[in-house]
């Protein structure tokens, strides 16, 4: 087994070569052993995405769980946020079989504790990996029981209690499910809304015949952008493979900056819960902090990654958290992330006003940003040290190391982070003007790529 399939927040690898039924059986048994140690409830909820390998891998994982005397509830086809809903609503630990936005040859497992609390390397994944490597003895005298439970309609009903859509004008919405799990959940959600929906790639197909279900890559949004324009739609939604992330396209066919969506949702949460805390990750636009404070909230900055955001939300009692990668976390959704819930917030805001989406988001788009730029490097630490030394000598510049290296000037900032899994440096730059952003971006890239 390759240790590299145990990532920072989940397990992910190639089907057959790395993620096999034998491996998932061993992981199920190891997960059960870990749950007993944590004094967690004795039942595990399991969901699965539309990849051809998911049912068989989930079967083996379930057998591993029950081999340790724990019971299993299978909820069948699910988005990742639907699995989190089930783990929260039932107050049980859970596991979701998905490789999210990864290409077709991959699969993986996202695990959580009861109440949808996250499991990452610092909170159990390393121990589960250790137990997989050791092997777990089978409890033949007390094998657990597996049963099935439908959760889709309960999931939809819960989402619709969190967002007031009663004042929404009729909207025309194009939804690109990317042949992923939004093709399963979106029909159940949108049949209850006052909207005309143009469906794209709703057929559940883990081979992704139209494009990869990875909307953070601009090429995967082109079909949606064209459809929004051709249908004269009010809004376009693009989901990733397991539908825990959603990206928005406005009526002009332009991508909505995820930081702008963070700002919009934050303002709505602060109306409901005045004076609350909002979490944002450190590659979000600085407009997020400004918007939160302008609306009477407290903005708290986080490292990148869902386990950090969820932990910080719990510690700070935050009502909402947003990541620039398109993950949005809600206290009233067990602090879990939901692409569908984020989309519903945007639809509610748009439906309440007689203005186009681009105008709705205009107040949140205050700066020019580079987006995330990856550079392959031979020595990430050495490259970052060169940048740190260079900018550290400048007056009026601040450095911090909350996550990688963040360098902040009067009218600009950038963050440079090393990838957890690849020899890459990830750069994000923001500045007051497009020209200044480009100048900073090019200067940093020229140095680290030299």
Image (tube, grey):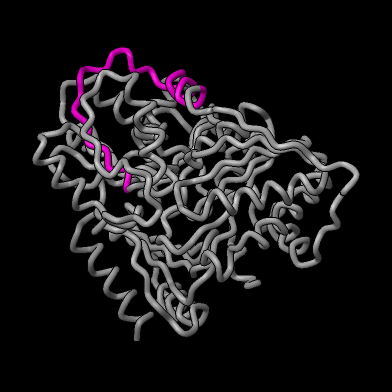
Q: Position of residue 191 (x, y in %)?
A: 32, 22
Q: Quadrant of the C terminus?
A: bottom left
In the image, what residue occupies the spot 27% across and 38% down? 175
* Total numbered labels placed on residues in the image: 0
* Image quadrant in which you'd find residue 36: top right
Residue 40 versus residue 306 in the image, above or below: above
Between residue 236 and residue 406, name the one nearer to us.
Answer: 236
Q: Quadrant of residue 265?
A: top left
In the drawing, does residue 295 fall left or right of residue 141?
A: left
- Which quarter shows the N terminus? bottom right
Which of 73/121 is in front? 73
Q: Which residues are magenta?
A: 154-178
Residue 438 on the magenta span: no
In the rendered image, is residue 287 in sight?
Answer: no
Q: What residue is shown at x 32% (from left), y 52% (from top)?
A: 215
Residue at left offset 38%, top offset 42%: 288
Q: Is residue 116 left or right of residue 436?
A: right
- Can see residue 416? yes
């Amino acid at each position: 087994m390759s240790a590299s399939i145990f990532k920072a927040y989940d397990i992910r690898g190639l089907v057959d070569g790395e993620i096999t039924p034998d491996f998932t059986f061993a992981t199920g048994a190891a997960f059960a052993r870990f749950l007993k140690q944590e004094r967690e409830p004795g039942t595990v909820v399991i969901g699965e995405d539309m990849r051809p390998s998911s049912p068989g891998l989930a079967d083996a994982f379930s057998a591993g769980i029950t081999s340790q005397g724990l019971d299993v509830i299978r909820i069948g086809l699910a988005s990742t946020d639907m699995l989190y809903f089930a783990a929260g609503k039932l107050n049980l630990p859970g596991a979701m079989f998905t490789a999210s936005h990864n290409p077709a040859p991959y699969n993986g497992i996202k695990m959580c504790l009861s109440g949808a609390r996250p499991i990452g390397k610092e909170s159990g994944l390393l121990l589960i990996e250790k137990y997989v490597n050791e092997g777990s003895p089978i409890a033949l005298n007390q094998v657990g029981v597996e049963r099935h439970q439908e959760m889709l309609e309960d999931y939809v009903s819960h989402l619709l209690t969190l967002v007031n859509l009663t004042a929404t004008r009729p909207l025309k919405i194009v939804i690109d499910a990317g042949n992923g799990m939004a093709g399963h959940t979106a029909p159940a959600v949108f049949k209850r809304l006052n909207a005309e929906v143009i469906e794209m790639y709703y057929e559940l197909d883990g081979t992704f015949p139209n494009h990869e279900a990875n909307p953070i890559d601009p090429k995967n949004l082109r079909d949606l952008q064209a459809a929004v324009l051709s249908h004269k739609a009010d809004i376009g939604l693009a989901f990733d493979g397991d539908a825990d992330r959603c990206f928005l396209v406005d009526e002009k066919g332009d991508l909505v900056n995820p930081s702008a969506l963070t700002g919009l949702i934050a303002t709505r949460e602060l109306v409901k819960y005045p004076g609350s805390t909002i979490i944002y990750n450190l590659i979000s636009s600085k407009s997020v902090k400004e918007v939160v404070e302008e609306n009477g909230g407290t903005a708290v900055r986080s490292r990148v990654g869902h386990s950090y955001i969820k932990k910080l939300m719990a510690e700070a009692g935050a009502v909402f958290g947003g990541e620039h990668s398109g993950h949005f976390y809600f206290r009233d959704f067990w602090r879990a992330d939901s692409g569908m819930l984020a989309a519903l917030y945007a639809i509610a805001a748009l439906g309440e006003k007689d203005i186009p989406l681009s105008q709705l988001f205009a107040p949140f788009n205050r700066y020019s940003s580079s987006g995330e730029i990856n550079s392959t490097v031979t020595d990430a630490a050495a490259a970052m040290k060169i940048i740190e030394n260079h900018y550290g000598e400048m007056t009026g510049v601040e450095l911090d190391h909350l996550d990688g290296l963040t360098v902040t000037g009067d009218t600009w900032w950038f963050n440079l982070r090393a990838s957890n899994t690849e020899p890459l440096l990830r750069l994000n730059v923001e500045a007051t003007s497009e020209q200044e952003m480009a100048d900073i971006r090019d200067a940093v890239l020229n140095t680290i790529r030299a």
